[in-house]
Amino acid sequence: MYRIGHIVCFLLWALTAQGQANLCTPPANSGVGGFDIVGGINEGCSPLRVEVINTSGSTNVYYDFDYRGQDLSTLKYDTLSKFPLFANTVARNYEILQYGKDASGKAIYACKTVSVRPNLQPEFSYSTCNNNLLNLIIPATSANNFDYYTIDWGDTSPIQNVSALPFSFSKSYSTSDLTRNIKVQGHNTVPNGCAPPPFKTIAMDGGGDVPKITSLETLPGGKNVKLTFTGQFDQHDIYQREVDKSYTYPNSILKSNPGSITLPIIGNKANCFMVYRNPGCIQLSGEACTISLDSIVPNGPFENIVNWESFVIGGPQLILQTSQVNSVNYKLNIQEIEPNTIFNRLKSLAVSPSPDVITKCNIKYCYQVEALFSGTWGQSPWVPYTSKVLSEVKCIDRKALKPPSIEKTWVTVEDETLIKFLYTNPVSWPVPIDSVYLYEEKNSNTALFSKAVNIPASPFFEINKNTIDDSYCFKMTFKDKCESVSQFSDLVCTVNLKENNALLNWSEELPFSSENIQSYKILETNENTGIESEISNFNSSVLSELVDLSGFDKEAKYRIKTIGDNGGESFSNSVEIPIDVLLFLPNVFTPNGDGNNDLLQIKGRFGRVKSLNFQVLNRWGEVVYRSTKFTDSWDGIINGKQASIGTYFYKAKILLTDGEELIKSGSFELIR
């Protein structure tokens, strides 16, 4: 039957959605069973008894005489009865399932359907008005499979015969009555033993199958609605308006039979709908309007904020007669979705935004606002109505939610083997952080470098790298207590400093995520005091500078300080420039006591000298003077006597602090 078929389809859809297969469609690798119903009966009136005969060839079979699509483990089975009794008070279909195993042990299945009605009443609809008008429709549906039909109008007029469907007729009575007793009956040429239906008492003013919007649901994406309405088996006019506009009778948007239709939403405001029909007097469904569910926002680990818009009740709306929304009551449908479980709950709504306290913050939550519109339509007497309105379903998967990245990160070099990556906690994110993850990026490849849990008040990572060789780039994510992983922060890189022949060159890297480079400063370290001072300041376009090394004796040390346009500071690695050792000896020595050039002493720059072995030799290669200190000098005396004038030779063997050995030799003239 028409209505029963829809119920069965819905049931099977629900079971299939849970991953269960309908056994009337045999599973793969199964066999085909078989049975007959004696007399080929596939329909009848309640109580109906049929006889089942097994034709499968197997004796190991069972039956479920009211199969509803469930899986094998939940079947109600009968191995003995061949005479099931079907008794019901409403028309419905029964699915008979045979299942078992053949001789080889393979599962077998077979199904047959029996339609059972309580009596000979066909499917029909009606509506009344003014106490004297009755509109009756007998549709051409699968349930109405009789040979002909009769109508007793409940007055003195003769019984009306109907031989073809669909049938529609408006009966105008000569007298006005509050109620009438009518009977619509189906007949078969060959009687089947079904009882005639009883008379039906109907109200004659606004009774029957008047239009009713049973549900109005905004579909996913928020661009369309599904309008479901009931009414007589006839076409109805559908009217639609934006909430701040009026209906334009007689310009309906379409005509439709009762059921569900999908319609586009007009504009960006709430849309309202009414269903209209006039079989001789006006019928309205009453008005229902869309409800908007705007967003679901996490607020801490155990609360979601539901933002929605309630309907503002306005004045009456007119389509020849008046319809007025009197009240709207709201509730919130909530689904908590875990991998193997779906839990449904319900809560009342009053105002927006509405907080929803949750117990688990790492699962998926789906929300839908449900509104019950109550109102009246017509003129005196007013006809009450109710309609259910559903918003679009919106979900928040707390685990899959992508929090925004940490906005402020920066990186700086601490020494030649240590980098510090610093960041600030995302104060705008309401859920506490569980852990943070540091990633290194090199040659466009990203790899996890480190993880930190229990974030300190001043959060940072310490990274061991050879900071002299190269620049290093990092970015980070965090995971909150709900297991949501944030987006990556912006990439930040250390500034790398190199030196070649006193020319400093530094890389053009951005060490800050939330600001641009304003300037570079060259910092120089005093080799005696260790105090660092700024010697140069450049704008962000300058990436090199030649430095003066003349003021250093041992080693010059420099690094770059990068200044951001929001006050950020980051330091490069340091470069240490060794100062060359310089030795000077005069080529003439005059130890004559005149106070001028009387002493032979090494002059120069000795900051990097660790040890000295200095010798003076005569022309025969004999050592006449030796010293291990730069402060020593030779006065030209050999063994208490003045050295002879002439040519002398020297040899200086020097060991530097870095282990390098220098040898310097030459000659000078001794003159008196």
Image: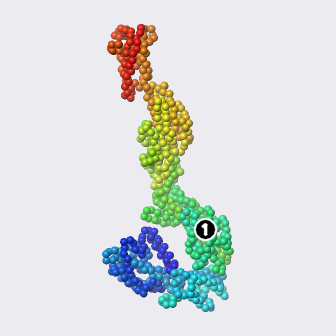
Q: Residue 109, image x and y in percent?
A: 38, 76
As drawn, 599 above or below 184 = above
As drawn, 515 above or below 395 = above
> In the figure, is residue 28 to the left or right of 405?
left
Please identify the quadrant where the C terminus is shown. top left
Q: Residue 335, image x and y in percent?
A: 49, 64
Viewer-proximal residue, 198 or 238?
A: 238
Q: How is the image coloured?
A: rainbow
- Residue at point 42% right, 77% down? 67
As drawn, 40 above or below 358 = below
Q: Is residue 438 visible?
A: no
Q: Mark 1 highlights which residue?
A: 289
> In the figure, is residue 664 to the left or right of 300?
left
Q: Is residue 398 visible?
A: yes
As drawn, 603 above or below 431 = above
Q: Quadrant of residue 308?
A: bottom right
- Residue at point 36% right, 72% down? 29
User: Residue type at mark 1?
Assistant: Cys
Q: Residue 49, image x and y in percent?
A: 43, 86
Q: Residue furthest left?
A: 104
Crowding at dot 1, Cα within 10 Å, few <14 / some 14-19 / many 20+, comes out as many
Describe the element under mark 1 as helix, strand or loop. Answer: strand
- Residue at point 46% right, 63% down? 337
Q: Residue 363, image x and y in percent?
A: 46, 60
- Residue at point 35% right, 74% down? 107
Q: How many marks?
A: 1
